[in-house]
Image (cartoon, helix red, strand yellow):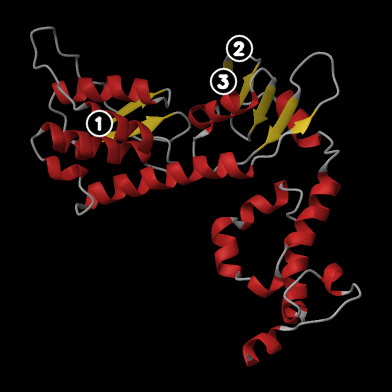
Amino acid sequence: MLTVRFDGSFQEWRNRARALLQSQVAPHEVSWAGGNESAGLFEEPLPTPANESGQRIRVPRQLLDELEMAARYRTEHRWSLLYRVLWRVNQGDSSARMVGDIDGSELHGRIKAVRREAHHLHAFLRFRPLQTSDGPQHVAWFEPAHDVLPWAAGHFAERMGGNSWLIATPEEGVCWDGQGIYYTRPCPTQWRQLAQNAADPGGELWKAYYESTFNPARLNRGVLENNLPVRFWKNLPEGMLIPQLMSRARAGAQRDGQAERVAAKNGKRIGRAAEQAD
């Protein structure tokens, strides 16, 4: 078994994969060890790179884009699938990219999961302002399931203009100074502490708004958790309210079709039973 060690980046994986293709090394003969991934006990030296007169490897641009996107999916053996798909396409088997194929289905499943996690980053990340003359003006803490941060963070540069900000995660971090984005891995301890300990002056106001607009009559726990996964609740201001609001809904708030504070105010009460009778 040939063990290929590299820094865990897609660009370095691409360079190693090209050399393996030129040397006609099949996927089952390769064990990938990128970044923190462990390899087998027995290693063999890498094959000698092909010279300039060797076979030139041509890979469709769209396939490279798909492989790069799928490489952001965190799994123990993320690189093995990518090389298997690349090998098959290079051998003339284009079905490796199709959803109906075993490898193609897994490839597109990973791409879909990565894109969804980027959407989660855009939707559920909360910036907190910092009252400081130096450093970023806003900071945020996020715990992504996949390596989407350096790719998806550009969204905030477009939205927040010249305002500087910092996003820290358990593994990596990005910082925008108003002109350019700076990426680092691993995330500095100072960045993590700054993002996790920053005060949220608007948190109470936001929680009051969320509670007042929560409609217990329309509560569907499955839909709620699908659109706002439970793993994000702990880092959202309204996260601690959601279990309480769901409990109140099950305990009778659904009869009023409105938040408890609104239902307690003076006025004519129109329950759901009356609507169903009509």
Q: How many numbered marks, from 0 up?
A: 3
Image disc number at residue 139 = none
Q: Is residue 193 among what the camera can see?
A: no
Q: Quadrant of the N terminus?
A: top left
Image disc number at residue 62 = 1
Kindly report the distance in space between the C-alpha atoms of the residues bearing marks 3 and 1. Answer: 26 Å
Tag 1: residue type? Gln
Name which residue lies at 77% across and 34% down: 128
Residue 244 image-quadrant placement:
bottom right
- Identify the secondary structure beneath mark 3: strand
Name which residue lies at 63% across and 19% down: 176
- Identify the secondary structure beneath mark 1: helix
Residue 120 image-quadrant placement:
top right
Dot 2, how many residues are within 10 Å of its Cα: few (below 14), some (14-19), or many (20+)? few
229 shown above or below 253: above
224 or 277, which lies in front?
277
Mark whose residue sits in front, 3 or 1: 1
Image disc number at residue 179 = 2
Dot 1, how many residues are within 10 Å of its Cα: few (below 14), some (14-19), or many (20+)? few
In this rendering, would 170 be left or right of 268? left
Image x and y of residue 251, in percent: 77, 80
In this rendering, would 24 be left or right of 45? left
Q: Are marks 3 and 1 in contact (CB under 8 Å)?
A: no
Image x and y of residue 192, in percent: 71, 30
Tag 3: residue type? Tyr
Image disc number at residue 183 = 3
Q: Quadrant of the C terminus?
A: bottom right
